[in-house]
Amino acid sequence: MAVLSALHGFVAGIGASVLSLFRATGALVLFAAQAILHIFTPPYYGREILRQMLRIGYFSLPVVGLTALFTGAVLALQIYIGGSRFNAEGVVASIVAIGIVRELGPVLGGLMVAGRVSASIAAELGTMRVTEQIDALTTLSTNPFKYLVAPRILAGVLTMPILVAVADTIGIMGGFLVGVNRLNFNASTYIANTVDFLQAGDIISGLIKASVFGFIITLLGCYHGYNSGRGAQGVGTATTNAVVSASVLILAANYILTEVFFST
Amino acid sequence: MKPKIELRDVHKSFGPKHVLRGVDLSVQKSESMVIIGGSGTGKSITIKSVLGLIKPDKGEVWVDDIRADKARGKQRDILLNKFGMLFQGGALFDSLKVWENVAFRMRRRMSAGDARDVAIEKLRRVGLGPENADLFPAELSGGMQKRVGLARAIADDPEIIFFDEPTTGLDPIMSDVINDLIREVVVEMGATALTITHDMTSVRKIADKVAMLHNGVIQWTGPVDDLDTCGDPYIDQFIHGRAEGPIEALR
Ligand SMILES: Nc1ncnc2c1ncn2[C@@H]1O[C@H](COP(=O)(O)OP(=O)(O)O)[C@@H](O)[C@H]1O
Ligand SMILES: [Mg+2]
């Protein structure tokens, strides 16, 4: 009997979590649809959009740039070690470039920005929720979705590709510095190899990924902040959930996007 | 006369907590109604249901000829344009300067310069000098923030103004200043006002009529002058602040 009821509790527990997962997914999809609708219908808050672009793009530059620099440097060393086993050390320049542009630039950049921006958006909107600032917006005839959510998501979608393009350049430069100074490649050969083997598709696929990640980062920041629970604890939970869910979704979306680009 | 605001049998629960259990309340045009009641009895929820910030589970809310709890789109815009609201915690936008807070609603149809002028005029109205206009809300004291919130609520000359605990957390002198301001605004602007408070001094100063919310319903409502003579045991306990009586104090 005890075993049966324990089993029942266990199964019911799984059922409840599956249901709540579905409910959360549905709520998120509705939230996203509403946000997209508001992005494309007036009024537009241009100043808010610019402010958010600055916050997401410009102020993330140091952390994303440093991440890219060290990643490019490490990549050059690792590929050199791997390549030397096949007597193929010459591929370092081109593989570093492809690896950074197609994969590591957008993914690591996305994860770093998720930590920074999802968290701060969730904390900001969560605080606005618990201090009734979101209610105040409504009573001042301003739709919070238009004024708060739409500018942030639009800024994320537009800014992430620019940020990642800069990060790609810095990452390749990191590889170049290690390649030339540590691995004794000829500088002009290294650059020639980088340029010659990099295709437009590599760059474009990476930037599309960046844009999608920008959407995920800002959407989850807004979603968790907007629906924040009450009190300081509610805001804390919202912040954590935003970062965790944005990071996981970025990795999942990255796999799906890579499959799509792989087969086209 | 047809009331300006009318709530009919409004119910609202949060999970198992049945907060409003059939609130009936009407406020006439240009009248100053004050809702009193203990903490957590649902006073804020009541006015939020008029503004459509929360949806009642049951009942009707009317503002003029608009069903406020059902209004959407254009109708909701018309409705919200009638209101000014002072939130319990001020709810000032902390990323915007004081004048931008006050002028928030007008910003869309005015140039920045004009909006700033209107904002400074409204700030003067609540006793704040122009030197405060370019500060951020966090740089102001609690009493000053309340006044900025008040200036924002009255900035666009609304027909109806809600004040949620305008004097809570203020010293007695500042409370008196705010009470005077509210009374002034109601009389001068001819606005309909609905104020929440548990400060009896405020009640006597700003109310034409009083409603007492307890156990999710309006227990008593009447003119402020009848407060002391109405003989209602709830009112009696509340205005004298007694621990013993029909209102059970949670310990
Ligand atoms: N969003 C909410 N979720 C759950 N409970 C709520 C929410 N808002 C208010 N409540 C509960 O409803 C009750 C009434 O709240 P409120 O109207 O703010 O009280 P007050 O009369 O002090 O203004 C309180 O017990 C509060 O805990
Ligand atoms: Mg309240």
Image: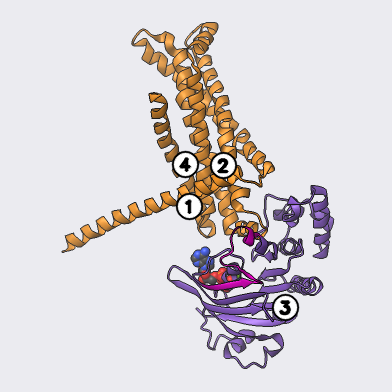
Chain colours: A orange, B purple
At mark 1, the secondary structure is helix
Cα distance between the residues tagged 2 and 4: 13 Å
Q: Is residue B83 magenta?
A: no
Cα distance between the residues tagged 3 and 2: 44 Å
Type of residue at label 3? Glu
Type of residue at label 4? Ala
Q: Position of residue A64 (x, y in %)?
A: 55, 30
Q: Position of residue A49 (x, y in %)?
A: 64, 41
Q: Is residue A100 left or right of residue A59?
A: left
Seen in the picture, residue B37 relative to A160 is either above or below; the reply is below
At mark 4, the secondary structure is helix
Residue at the disc numbered 4: A246
The residue most toward the left is A1
- Circles 2 and 1, Cβ within 8 Å, touching? The answer is no
At mark 2, the secondary structure is helix
Is ligand 1 closer than 8 angstroms to the Cβ of mark 1? no
Residue at the disc numbered 3: B31
Residue at image x 62%, y 93%?
B231
